[in-house]
Image (spheres, grey):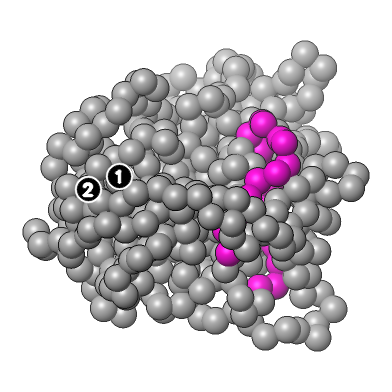
């Protein structure tokens, strides 16, 4: 409920953000949108036995010197089960549906598994307030709610409008500048009307724009992996783009500002094959709205949250951010999913971040509570399997490219 994190995001506003700085345990609801719940009237008579209604409170984040206003709309479904829709209105106000919720003996609890957050609070005797704690990762913060009515309820921002699905956006205006030396992290994001990146080199930009691994780029000059750029590009079509429209926008910028020209070829490559593990997938089908952006968010190396992604999207995120070879989706799964993965990285992973101030993966740990290696974690936690193989895959051969003139 917080941004509660400092996003590494490549998704939801990033639609696909990759950053190497570790998330603080302050999450972010802003990047996670769900269909709003039908809330009951905010004028319900307060009762210590009735949690249904609109509740609001402020999360004070001293470490970030920031306050976030949080709204919970609580209703019951036709089976009498609680439904909690959470809004962090100072982070855009996109709704997030709680994974679970309960109210027993005056104690209100809910959890949002995607961001590994949970809340527990006690309702006052008069039914007007809830005093409790929001916990996310190792961090816990006080969060107290007041029951709201039509006169006191905070306005929830309108969700951003999506770009028309058939739009093929071009560049209205764009700036490309060398990145600040020594700045840690990496970001792909869509902020307001702008596609924004920082600390992104050409390997990052080309692999994101064309859904490739760096080993699928042939004939690139050395500066593809060493020179980093900050980009701010405004499309010539209004609305929030989907992931494919973001890629198209970046493709046009690469052609215009970097004079990138290439041709395609097919080659057999060493790769990782993503498949369904015995016992079937454990990923939950997303509850995100159809036009919500996907999320591929790292709160730390080996601590991944996947949101509203197809398996092809997930494979692309893994090959872009984590793996040392292309990742080929052979799961046959067609839905969009939400799931978390937590593993202990090895020294072959996250090489893309090591030039941007990211720490190397930790050495193997004797701690019995340490997360398992990726190959075990993905099977135990997501019901998927990833292993080495060979695959015929697309590559691009660079014919011409130039360093951009900064502006």
Q: Reply above or below: 87 against 320.
A: above
Q: Which type of secondary structure does the marked residue at label 1 adopt?
A: helix
Of residues 29 and 198, which is closer to you in this image?
Answer: 198
- Residue 255 is labelled as 2
Magenta segment boundaries in residue numbering: 325-345
Q: Reply above or below: 311 against 60.
A: above
Q: Which type of secondary structure does the marked residue at label 2 adopt?
A: helix
Callout 2 touching callout 1 (CB < 8 Å): yes
Task: Report crowding for label 1: few under 14, some 14 to 19, many 20 or more residues within 10 A (C-alpha).
Answer: some
Quadrant placement of the C terminus: bottom left
Residue 258 is drawn in which quadrant?
A: bottom left
Which residue is denoted by mark 1 in the rendering? 251
Asked if the stretch drawn in magenta spans residue 207, the answer is no
Residue at 66% across, 73% down: 345
Residue at 72% across, 63% down: 388
Residue at 77% across, 54% down: 385
- Mark 2 and mark 1: Cα distance apart in space: 6 Å
């Amino acid at each position: 409920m917080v941004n509660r994190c400092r996003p590494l995001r490549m998704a939801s506003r990033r639609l696909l953000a990759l950053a190497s700085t570790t998330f603080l345990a302050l999450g972010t609801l802003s990047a996670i949108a769900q269909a709003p719940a039908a809330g009951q009237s905010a004028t319900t008579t307060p009762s210590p036995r009735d949690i249904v209604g609109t509740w609001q409170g402020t999360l004070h984040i001293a470490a970030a010197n920031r306050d976030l206003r949080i709204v919970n709309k609580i209703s019951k479904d036709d089976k009498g089960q609680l439904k909690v829709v959470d809004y962090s209105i100072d982070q855009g106000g996109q709704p997030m549906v709680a994974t679970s919720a309960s109210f027993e003996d005056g104690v209100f609890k809910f959890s949002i598994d995607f961001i590994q957050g949970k809340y527990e609070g006690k309702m006052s005797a008069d039914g007007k307030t809830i005093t409790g704690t929001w916990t996310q990762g190792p961090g816990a913060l006080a969060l107290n709610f007041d029951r709201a009515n039509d006169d006191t309820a905070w306005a929830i921002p309108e969700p951003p409008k999506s770009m028309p699905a058939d739009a093929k956006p071009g560049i209205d205006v764009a700036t490309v500048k060398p990145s600040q030396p020594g700045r840690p992290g990496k970001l792909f994001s869509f902020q307001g009307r702008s596609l924004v990146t920082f600390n992104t080199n050409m390997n990052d930009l080309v692999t994101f724009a064309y859904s490739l691994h760096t080993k699928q780029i042939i004939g690139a000059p050395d500066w593809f992996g060493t020179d980093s750029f900050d980009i701010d590009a405004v499309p010539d079509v209004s609305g929030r783009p989907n992931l494919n429209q973001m890629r198209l926008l970046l493709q046009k910028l690469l052609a215009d500002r970097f004079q990138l020209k290439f041709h395609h070829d097919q080659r057999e490559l060493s790769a990782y094959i993503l498949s369904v593990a015995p016992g079937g997938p454990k990923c939950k089908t997303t509850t995100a709205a159809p036009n919500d952006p996907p999320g591929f968010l790292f709160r730390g190396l080996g601590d991944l949250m996947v949101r509203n992604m197809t398996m092809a999207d997930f494979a692309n995120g893994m090959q872009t951010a984590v793996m040392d070879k292309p990742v080929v989706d052979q799961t046959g799964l067609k839905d969009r999913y939400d799931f978390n993965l937590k593993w202990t990285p090895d020294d072959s992973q996250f090489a893309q971040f090591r030039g941007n101030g990211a720490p190397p993966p930790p050495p193997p740990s004797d701690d019995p509570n340490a997360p398992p290696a990726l190959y075990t974690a993905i099977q135990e936690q997501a019901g998927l399997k990833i292993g080495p193989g060979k695959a015929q895959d697309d590559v691009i051969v660079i014919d011409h490219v130039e360093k951009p003139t900064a502006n």
